[in-house]
Amino acid sequence: MIRELITILLGLGVGCWVIALLKAIRTAGVRPGAGPGPFPPVEPGTRWLACHDMACGHMTTRWLPGPGGTLRCERVAEHRGAVHLTHTTAEEGSDA
């Protein structure tokens, strides 16, 4: 019984050291990755609204203020139409 216990403890000890050695070899010379970059500044008047265009997948996107109290989706260049505007008084995210 004592013999088996000693064998188990030696096996665990050697196994742990082998795993630690393999990890040290695998991570030798590896630098930690860079963290996330800074968030871009948000333009005053920006709102998060649902965009009902297929390019945005009907998801909530950032809408930037435009002339005359309008808002435009920040991904307007990917939309089907040339202009994708909505008035602030219109239903959120709907085309004007």
Image (cartoon, helix red, strand yellow):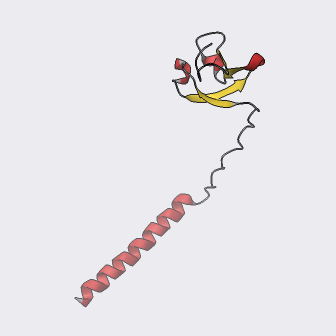
Count the numbered circles shown.
Answer: 0
The residue sitting at 40% across, 78% down in the picture is: 13
In this picture, is 5 found above or below 19?
below
- Asked where in the image residue 31 lies, by quadrant, the reply is bottom right
> In x, y percent, where is residue 64?
71, 26
In this picture, is 6 found above or below 63?
below
The residue sitting at 53% across, 64% down in the picture is: 24
Residue at the left extreme of this rendering = 1
Residue nearer the viewer, 59 or 71:
71
Residue at the bottom extreme of this rendering = 2
In this picture, is 51 found above or below 26?
above
- Asked where in the image residue 52 lies, by quadrant, the reply is top right
Residue at the top extreme of this rendering = 82
The residue sitting at 71% across, 30% down in the picture is: 46
Quarter the C terminus occupies: top right
Quarter the N terminus occupies: bottom left
> In x, y percent, where is residue 63?
66, 26
10 left or right of 37 in image:
left
> In x, y percent, where is residue 41?
75, 37
45 left or right of 94 in image:
right
> In x, y percent, where is residue 17?
45, 73
The residue sitting at 48% across, 68% down in the picture is: 20
Residue nearer the viewer, 94 or 14:
94
- Asked where in the image residue 2 lies, by quadrant, the reply is bottom left
